[in-house]
Image (cartoon, coloured by chain):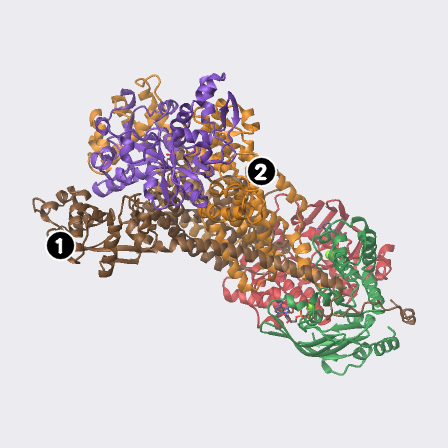
Chain colours: A purple, B green, C red, D brown, E orange
Amino acid sequence: QGRDNVQVAGSSTVLPYASIVAEAFGENFDFPTPVVESGGSSAGLARFCEGVGENTIDIANASRAIREGEIEACAANGVNEIIEVRIGYDGIVFASDIDGETFAFTPADWYQALAAELPVDGEMVANPNTSWAEVNADLPDQEILAFIPGTKHGTREVFEEKVLLAGCEETGAMQAMMDAGMDEDAAEEACIDTRTDGVSVDIDGDYTETLARIEANPNGIGVFGLSFYENNTDSLQVATMSGVEPSTETIASGDYPVSRPLYFYIKKAHLGVIPGLQEFAEFFVADEIAGPDGPLSAYGLVADPELAATQEAVANGTTMDAM
Amino acid sequence: MNDMRTMDNAVNHDTKITARDVHVHYGTTHAIKGVDVDIADRTVTAFIGPSGCGKSTFLRCLNRMNDTIPGALVTGEIKIDEADIYDPRVDPVQLRAKVGMVFQKPNPFPKSIYDNVAYGPKIHGMARNKADLDEIVEKALRRGAIWDEVKDRLHAPGTGLSGGQQQRLCIARAVATEPEILLMDEPCSALDPIATAQVEELIDELKQNFSVVIVTHSMQQAARVSQRTAFFHLGHLVEFGETGKIFTNPEDSRTESYISGRIG
Amino acid sequence: MNDMRTMDNAVNHDTKITARDVHVHYGTTHAIKGVDVDIADRTVTAFIGPSGCGKSTFLRCLNRMNDTIPGALVTGEIKIDEADIYDPRVDPVQLRAKVGMVFQKPNPFPKSIYDNVAYGPKIHGMARNKADLDEIVEKALRRGAIWDEVKDRLHAPGTGLSGGQQQRLCIARAVATEPEILLMDEPCSALDPIATAQVEELIDELKQNFSVVIVTHSMQQAARVSQRTAFFHLGHLVEFGETGKIFTNPEDSRTESYISGRIG
Amino acid sequence: MTDITDSAAQPERRETGRSILEADARTKKRNRAETRFKAYGIAALGVGGLFLIALLWAILSNGLTAFTQTYVQLDVPLIEEKLDKDGDRDPAKIAKVSTFGYNPLIEQALVELVEREGLETELEPKALTKMLSGAAAADIRDRVLANPELIGQTVSFEVLASSRVDGYLKGRVSRESLARDKNLDAEHLDLIDALQQTGAVEKRFNWAFITGADASDSRPEQAGIGVAMLGSLFMMLVVLVLSLPIGVAASIYLEEFAPQNRLTDLIEVNISNLAAVPSIVFGILGLAVFIQFMHLPQSAPLVGGLVLTLMTLPTIIISTRAALKAVPPSIRDAALGVGASKMQSVMHHVLPLAMPGILTGTILGLAQALGETAPLLLIGMVGYIATNYPDGVAEGFLAPNSAMPAQIYEWAKRADPAFYERAWGGIIVLLVFLLAMNLLAILLRRRFERRW
Amino acid sequence: MPTLPIVLIVLAIAVAAYLLARSRAQRAAAREGRRLHSLPNYYGWTGALYAAGPALLLLAVWLVAQPVATRMAVWPVLEAEAAPNAQPALLMADVQRLAAGIDAAVASGRVPAAEAGDIPAEELRELMAGQGVALGSDVTPATRQAALRWRGLSAGGDLARTLAVIGLALVGAAFGVSRAKPDFRARNAVETAMRGTLIGAALLAILTTVGIVLALIFNTIEFFRLYPAAEFFFGSTWSPSFGGGSELGILPLLWGTLYISIIALLVAVPIGLFAAIYLAEYAHKNVRSWAKPMLEMLAGIPTIVYGLFALLTVGPLLVDLFGRNGALGVNWMQGGTAVMTAGLVMGIMLIPFVSSLSDDIINAVPQSLRDGSLGLGATRSETVRQVVLPAALPGIVGAVLLAASRAIGETMIVVLGAGAAARLSMNPFDAMTTVTAKIVSQLTGDADFSSPEALVAFALGMTLFVITLALNVVALWIVRRYREQYE
Ligand SMILES: Nc1ncnc2c1ncn2[C@@H]1O[C@H](COP(=O)(O)OP(=O)(O)OP(=O)(O)O)[C@@H](O)[C@H]1O
Ligand SMILES: Nc1ncnc2c1ncn2[C@@H]1O[C@H](COP(=O)(O)OP(=O)(O)OP(=O)(O)O)[C@@H](O)[C@H]1O
Ligand SMILES: [Mg+2]
Ligand SMILES: [Mg+2]
Ligand SMILES: O=P([O-])([O-])[O-]
């Protein structure tokens, strides 16, 4: 008996968007509502690459691009033709308790607040900063306590690259380290190495956990997805980064620096054979859904300026190696 | 037995236990029906009667072991040393320390033989040290007439003994705590004549200082060890008096029938 | 008892059970030491001996109830009706259906009195219908001399009976399945003389068709009911023979000492 | 036997004279220990009860609001040229109009409502729709597709208010907290207040929460736990039907029949070890064995049930074995003695006596299975799944579905705080389900309990 | 014929065999005037078992074997044309799906049965799509050929299977019925079969273990290929990172697991045990029958609730006590999430595991032992501590082990309550994490699934599995040693 519904699995970051699309798809098409599982990008891609056939999923959501090793693993199991679809961007924001102080950060502030060691006169010393005011006199005198994504999250990578590393370069710390004899890789490592004295807390869970922690500890500053923040403006206030307030507009325009693309991957072998798969994929990236005025954007997705190209690729079934 | 001495003893001693109008119900079963009895100090009192007549039940009233049977209801008055044992102020624990009991079915603890006997003395703090305790245990086992059989296996489990050995172990366990009153529910039922004689000797010895109440089916045994005998029948205490008199010249016809082997 | 008849009976019947060089070890305890015995059909054989000498142990060998004791090891040969009961092909279940047992400690099932007795007949398919079963149960309870006491409370739990009642219930339960051989481990230990007499009558009746082996501490009882008597001592079968002879003219000095009450 | 000699000298009476009314020092001490011991027991029970109350309080206070929901009474003009241009009521053509096509109608209905009630507002018609759930359009469309003859009329619908409006009426959303919310403004709230006066906006008991299906992240007000409850029900059926007999059978073998040897030890150790295996590892196992190897469908309650069965087995086995062990050997002897086989003695006597323990194991095992999420993550039962009622029993086992704890977990992660309230509401439903499920076991256990 | 009807037919035959065998045995017994060896029902059951047992077994084996055999028979058709690096399994999967799809098309009447063999390869994929059958690639003539071959073979196989299974059932039934004579040991036969079932159930545990090991082992090996084993087992730092250069030492995780479990047990065991004792020995029956199920509710609350409870209630409470400006003024605790928080809350969850099971076991200790002790003048508590508990020890240890196992395996509470910091610290007020929490997080994260950072989840699972196995061996040994058997 044939499977008649589309099966999607993967990133919990993409899940909300996928569920909105799936719901609308189920309402407006004769196909059954697709099943969207969560479980993480990695687990989703792992199942995606399990092989071809009804007992494997059709689409993997990912909050990062598929990696080389994964493509190989896919190929080894016969999943050769993969269509990559970028659905938009996820803005990453820094927010704190609504009743607390207001912050305006720069990447440099974060680097200096969270780095494990800072270069002082060519020597690496353990980070001595305990208050944001010590980092930057313009910031409130509030103890440093940051809830940052754990290393299982792709967001962490973005955070390291676009905040810590950028801050490290901005402050000249990177240069100082290299001057002190470190090679570039080691210096980069040192830049993104966060302190372990309890000031920087890794969150392996979801944004709700980060929020709960801020509620339990109002001095904390957390890292959230834009959509999450927008749904919780009653308890969170957002900080500006380098003077830019995060919003779908500022992120789409590239003014706000911290964001990452979100993807889903389609198994081409299933196109045309799993009922509704093609339609679902096209519906997902249609303007009325993923465009700037669509429900995804309303929910917090930053629409992809190159959506048209994506739509075309989906319609043509352009696979990755063909790109 | 020497009837004279029996009389003598019985008259000499004060009443230790008084029961007045005791009734016991197990749910709907009316097991004891208005029993009045006075048990004298330093005497052996035997309870006899056909199986199921309520001997064990009444015996268990005397140290409130019936408390542990769900549904058992005891009414009436039982006094030991003038104190009502069903008084709310009475601590059944202390009562039972004073009124020891050997149960009808031997129930050794699943512990070593030594620990079985040492248990009581330990909880009552009767030994100051290990040597004391060893002594108490040995003495109790000797009095229970089982020392020779178990002295080499004191640390073997008490549950691995033969039926009669378990029974004697339970006797030893009960006497180890030196109760003032000892209730023994058919203590010799699983014993051979020699062991029985040894236990009877123990009872006789205990009687010098304490009160012993013994349930027995053997009228010979009752005649041998007891000074007073109570005959129970269908929950009633039919007759109670000097052992000699009960066996030779009972007042109630039922007693007579039972003794002569006509009712059961 | 009539000695003439006893002799008579004993000679008439073939051997039902033969035991040769039976040893039983419980871990390190050597409980039975090389016992040889022939138990005749349609006879009552009494096992006597001091407490702990191995009577129960040997009895349990005869229907392989020792199998259930962890650590018990039986060696030697025991044949019933010429078949070795320790042969691997033997089904102990069938054996036990044929060789019934009354245990030393009464162990009623925590079920109703009726169900206690009906259980065996049910699993052996002895009743075609409820009426049949009722009849079997009543008959067994009557034979166990307990019918009158329990007929109004057949559906009360068997564990709520008095000690002696439980014992008789277990006897009733054992006879309900009509075994060919009945092993009774001190079946009258908790019974009053009348009940004892009734059970002895039952034994006498059973003997007409079946073999009965009874462990007893009462030499009077052994003399009353049995045709042959085996005297055990410290795991040895010291003497075995016609009951009359054992009690009047024992060959072994230990037997004599025991019977005259000198060793225990 | 004794003779007269003893009676000659009366030895010293042991100087105890222990009164039973006055405790001596040692007894007092022991009694204090006794009182303490009992107090520990009461305290333990009290602490347990306290924790339970604290948890239940947290659950109830957070979750009860999920059982009410705000609805808006709306007269929607089903304009023919928008919904059926040709006017031939061809269902296929009517279906072509997507939910987006219904939005203008709703807008219009709202504007009319405001006007009819004589209210003033500065909000744009499009902004007005923010007061309603996204589900409204879908609801109306469904009704129209079911009864095309409605087209052309103005039909009264009861539609869901948006989660923010609902939150406002429940006190979760306040005017201040809306300051930065881009979804709703204070103006909306004025309107809502006014509409509530007129009765067009109303808060009612939320049956849809108990019977409904999951909804996407943008429509918390529509989400219900009914379908997931069904998923749990089918999973629990599998668990009960498999784990109880298998668990009891395995325990009987190990406790009553198994010879004392290495194999038995191995099995025994294995079973206790399985109890310590993290539940997610059972998920890995389930994915590998049931989905990849046996090709059972993904996200199916059947697979979930199988995985949870494996996870529950150790609990049932361990408790059953403990209960079997506690049955006194004399009972077994008694049965064997009348010629019952080992099997019969176990089945007829030992097992009934061990029943309370077995049922306890079942209660705990099922409770654990019912509340477990982690393994479901790997076999595809967590996410946006519980969207449709299965048709029929076979579908119930095989069609994709979620389960209550997975649904709760999902909701707890979602961004909109309205989902958070539903997560707690879902927990209430789960606990009621748990009690209902275990009620039989609890009653049975009470019946079987006895002492011997 | 599909499987379900076959099974139903076999069961019907079994029922018939049951009735026949039973009545035959009864009649024979009546005729020969002998008693049956066993109860009549046992004869019935033997008949039924002979009928159903072998037949169903055959069916099961056949169901597994037929596709394998067919696959082997069909592969040569494909082999010639297959690309050199093509995967037989994948190609065969396509063939199988294609064959199933054609079957479905025939069944639904879209393709007349006679023409099924004539559909050209090019049209097949479309036809299949209409049928909702996913194919890996376009249909080549060889695939089509293979699929047709497959259909032919499996149709034959299905027929043979139906006949063989039903035939075997009939033969078995006949045999079973023929054995129903009075002297046949029917009970023994049935009990042997039952025993086999029991053993089977017990072996399921081993099977599960094998399954778990197999599900973990390949990825574990893969992990150790990428990451040195010595650093994994003896490394004292856990810091995975995306850029490579992760340090994946298990020690801090093991320490966290141990620490949290111990605290949880320190909470659950005394509370659970005392509650059990109180319920079994002191409480009124009505109190007990209410309190016990109530406590059991603690086991049914989803762990995420406990996690939130830890994070939002217990954590802040502990900080108020032990934190910087806490009531105790000790400044031991930096944040709300700590070993203590998670341990406490986990302990609450485990209470019913200890209390309910122990309560049952304590309740099962024979009253005569209590009487024996009380009769010596022991207080109830002395009786409980020195007589009842030792007698109930094996069961209680079982309950505690179960609780400990749950503590080791628990995730959600740790994730939310203990913080995610992997560190080796003695301070119970520090944040730490456990092996299971990391298994979940590494498995569900964003990391490349073929990277050591993701694969480490399997190695963690495997290691934990081995460690708990060792602990259980020790526990078994201890229980054996201290068991007190009553009676
Ligand atoms: N389960 C057991 N484990 C170890 N030793 C045992 C066990 N059962 C009995 N024994 C020992 O074996 C010996 C014989 O015991 P058995 O029960 O056969 O005695 P008995 O003759 O029946 O005594 P009694 O008349 O007291 O019942 C005794 O020394 C006893 O301690
Ligand atoms: N737990 C109980 N529940 C209900 N009835 C009981 C219980 N215990 C005893 N009985 C009944 O109470 C009556 C007296 O029992 P008791 O045990 O006192 O008899 P007994 O005189 O000791 O007899 P035996 O000599 O047989 O031990 C009997 O009819 C018995 O069946
Ligand atoms: Mg009695
Ligand atoms: Mg014996
Ligand atoms: O679930 P994520 O892969 O987006 O963290």
Farthest residue, direction front: A137
Please give the residue where the numbered disc 1 appears in the rendered image: D154
Q: Chain of mark 1?
A: D
Badge 2 element: helix
Please give the residue where the numbered disc 2 appears in the rendered image: D266
Q: Could you tell me the amino acid type at mark 1?
A: Thr
Identify which residue is drawn at 49% across, 16% down: A181
Decide if residue D370 is on the left or right side of residue A89: right
Q: Residues within 10 Å of mark 1 (few under 14, many from 20)?
A: some
Q: Chain of mark 2?
A: D
Asked if disc 1 is less than 8 Å from ligand 5, the answer is: no
The answer to whether residue A33 of the structure is visible from this angle is: no
Residue A251 picture location, percent across and down: 29, 32
Badge 1 element: strand
- Badge 1 or badge 2: first in the primary sequence: 1
Q: Quadrant of the C terminus of chain B?
A: bottom right
